[in-house]
Image (cartoon, rainbow, N blue to C red):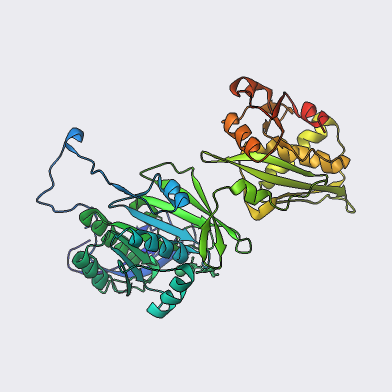
């Protein structure tokens, strides 16, 4: 692109692919009709190297780099710290995505409050709410110190100047889609605006060693609106998700340059903001029926954390030729596969039955270790036999009905013990890897039939 010239380019709204002319189908992501025209002023592009002072930049040996004693800042929210990989890293750029109304602004305002109590300089920039509206929200959350400064602004230049001038420790930008750069003529939220804004914040974060949070809205498809490039530019991507109707929210790391992406943080939306849920198992099992068939507790691993979850199944006679199968919170095809295994390997005639499987609490689980639990819940409902309410089940089920090993069985058994369970059914191949724990019986099973016989 020629310097100093206003050019018109076309961007794919889906993946950010750039093209000098309009295209019906994007060559990058193969989506149709996603190109929009945007004016780009050359010169504003291509300065996003994130480096600090150019003159000072020299290659350095790893051994010469000193880690300052305090490169991670605790947000005083254990759940968030864990997802971030042990605290907020100075100079990092974190993108927080999520559906509207899920609690992104609330979470970040609470983070600001905790940090400002630690006497850290915090700047909260809102392009969506007025100062009064933020104040109303803040009043629900609690007392705020003087170290937190608010700014209602959408102009990138002004924000950049403020940050350079005040040099805060932490900055929150709510949201990236409302920020605009005057030299770019396209509307706020467009691909080039979002890209420009992110690159400005990236430079500020690296240059001033300021940790910056960016709030990003999510499209219907569940990705942060704007180009995918955004996710590549930032250090950490967190998604805040959950059922709008259930009180709990889950913060999930999707990308993290400073830690694992498997961790989740669980929060509960209360009248005074978000509360951390330290024991999600207890939360997920509350309200579990005592003597009902079709209900079983499984232990699923979310990152390094075992979580007990109740699986419910309802199997009933189908009134139609084609039986109805429905799943909530788990993979539909996986459940169909398990039903097929039960039919073939156990000879259950499920072919003329409707089957519904629900993961209680509105959470979504994907882990194959919950297979055996799903299978047992289906059989329990089919035979109308109650499963021992003090039992948990873990194991992956293969197509020939064998129960395959799962990881971290010990941690799962311990979690069960903590919540007062007395019986664990695990794959027999994992029997060697678990140490005996007092007060809990562990049974190894080789195949689904052995597990069903325990009913
Ligand atoms: P918000 O943080 O504004 O969501 P986002 O920034 O992701 O769009 O969250 C708004 C929702 O949270 C709203 O539905 C009201 C609810 N809420 C509470 O239940 N309790 C509270 O203390 C606060 C501040 C919000
Ligand atoms: Mg908001």
Does 99 sit left or right of 371 as displayed?
A: left
| Residue 190 occupies quadrant | bottom left
Q: Which one is nearer the viewer's eye here, 160 or 332? A: 160
| Residue 20 occupies quadrant | bottom left
Residue 30 at least partly seen: no
- Figure check: 324 above or below 133: above
- Residue at x-position 61% and y-position 30%: 406
Q: Which one is nearer the viewer's eye here, 257 or 386? A: 386
Location of the C terminus by quadrant is: top right
Residue lying furthest left:
55
- Residue at x-position 20% and y-position 52%: 51
Q: How many marks?
A: 0
Residue 371 at least partly seen: yes
Estimate the x, y position of residue 188 in percent, counting from the top left.
36, 72
- Figure check: 201 above or below 295: below
Estimate the x, y position of residue 36 in percent, counting from the top left.
40, 68
Estimate the x, y position of residue 231 in percent, counting from the top left.
39, 53
- Figure check: 329 above or below 190: above
Residue lying furthest top:
432
- Figure check: 118 above or below 177: above
Does 14 sit left or right of 447 as displayed?
A: left
Location of the N terminus by quadrant is: bottom left
């Amino acid at each position: 692109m020629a310097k100093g010239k206003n050019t018109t380019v076309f961007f794919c709204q889906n993946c950010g692919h750039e093209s000098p002319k309009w295209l019906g189908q994007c060559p990058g992501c193969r989506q149709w009709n996603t190109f929009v025209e945007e004016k780009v002023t050359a010169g504003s592009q291509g300065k996003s190297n994130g480096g600090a002072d150019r003159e000072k930049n020299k290659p350095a040996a790893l051994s010469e780099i000193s880690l300052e004693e305090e490169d991670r800042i605790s947000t005083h929210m254990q759940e968030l710290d864990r997802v971030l990989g042990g605290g907020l890293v100075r100079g990092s750029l974190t993108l927080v995505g999520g559906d509207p109304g899920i609690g992104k602004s609330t979470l970040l305002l609470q983070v600001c409050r905790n940090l400002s109590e630690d006497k850290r300089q915090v700047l909260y920039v809102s392009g969506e709410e007025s100062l009064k509206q933020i104040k109303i929200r803040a009043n629900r959350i609690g007392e705020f110190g003087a170290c937190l400064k608010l700014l209602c602004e959408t102009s990138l230049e002004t924000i950049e100047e403020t940050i350079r001038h005040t040099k805060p420790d932490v900055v929150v930008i709510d949201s990236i889609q409302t920020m605009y750069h005057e030299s770019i003529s396209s509307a706020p939220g467009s691909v080039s605006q979002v890209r420009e804004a992110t690159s400005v914040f990236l430079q500020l974060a690296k240059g001033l060693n300021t940790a910056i949070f960016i709030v990003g809205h999510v499209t219907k498809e569940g990705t942060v609106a704007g180009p995918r490039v955004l996710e590549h530019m930032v250090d950490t991507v967190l998604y805040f998700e959950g059922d709008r109707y259930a009180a709990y929210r889950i913060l999930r790391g999707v990308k993290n340059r400073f830690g694992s992406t498997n961790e989740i943080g669980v929060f509960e939306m209360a009248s005074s903001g978000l509360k951390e849920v330290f024991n999600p198992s207890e939360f997920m099992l509350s309200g579990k029926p005592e003597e009902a068939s079709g209900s079983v507790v499984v232990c699923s691993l979310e990152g390094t954390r075992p979580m007990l979850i109740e699986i419910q199944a309802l199997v009933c006679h189908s009134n139609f030729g084609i039986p109805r199968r429905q799943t909530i919170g788990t993979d539909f095809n996986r459940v169909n596969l398990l039903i097929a295994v039960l039919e073939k390997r156990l000879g259950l005639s499920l072919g003329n039955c409707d089957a519904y499987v629900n993961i209680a609490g509105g959470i979504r689980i994907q882990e194959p270790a919950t297979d055996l639990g799903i299978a047992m819940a289906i059989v329990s409902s089919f035979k109308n036999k109650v499963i021992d309410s003090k039992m948990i089940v873990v194991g992956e089920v293969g197509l020939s009905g064998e129960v395959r090993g799962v990881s971290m069985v010990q941690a799962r058994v311990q979690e069960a013990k903590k919540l007062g369970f007395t019986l664990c059914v695990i794959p027999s191949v994992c029997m060697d890897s678990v140490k005996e724990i007092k007060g809990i019986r562990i049974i190894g099973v080789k195949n689904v039939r052995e597990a069903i016989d325990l009913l």
